[in-house]
Image: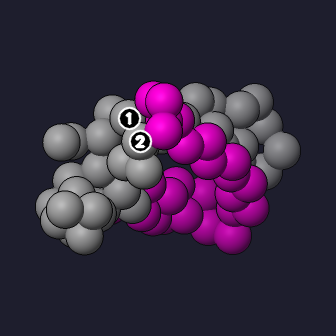
Amino acid sequence: MLRDLNQNGGYYQLEQQLQTTWKDLQVTNPGAKIRFKVDVHYTGTSEVPDSFTVQFSVDGGPWEERVFPNVK
């Protein structure tokens, strides 16, 4: 079950969206340095995350935050 979530939603979806966002930033701002933090949120003792919070900054600018719910 965890493998299915990771491949068909949740983390896979998060990874795809972040890659697209950061690729677009590199096109509009070549050579930009992107710093990021990822927090994974779980409920109780579940091994499956409920959501992911991603914060990122481009070239030392303000931090932007996005929350990605896990598709279950």
Is 43 a magenta residue?
yes
* Residue 34, x across and y down, in percent: 69, 57
> Which of 26 and 48 lies nearest the eye of the viewer?
48
Is 6 a magenta residue?
no
Which residue type carries mark 1? Asp
Q: Nearer the viewer, mark 1 or mark 2?
A: 2
> Which of 52 and 4 lies nearest the eye of the viewer?
4
* Residue 68 visible, this angle: no
Q: Residue at x 48, y 30 (%)?
A: 44
> Which of 50 and 32 lies nearest the eye of the viewer?
50
> Which stretch is magenta?
16-45
* Circle 2 Cα neighbour tier, 10 Å, few/some/many (<14 / 14–19 / ≥20): few
* Residue 57, x across and y down, in percent: 71, 43
Q: Is residue 8 above or below residue 50?
A: below
Quarter-wise, where is residue 72 in the image?
A: top left
* Residue 27 visible, this angle: yes
In the picture, the quarter occupied by the N terminus is: bottom left
Give me the C-alpha separation between circle 1 and circle 2: 9 Å
Q: Residue at x 54, y 64 (%)?
A: 26
Q: Residue at x 42, y 50 (%)?
A: 47
Q: Secondary structure at mark 1?
A: loop
In this image, 20 relative to 30: left or right?
A: left
Total of numbered circles in the picture? Answer: 2
* Residue 28, x across and y down, in percent: 51, 56
Residue picked out by circle 2: 46
Q: Are marks 1 and 2 in contact (CB under 8 Å)?
A: yes
Q: Indicate how the structure is coloured in the image.
A: one colour
* Residue 8, x across and y down, in percent: 16, 61
Residue picked out by circle 1: 50
> Which of 26 and 4 lies nearest the eye of the viewer?
4
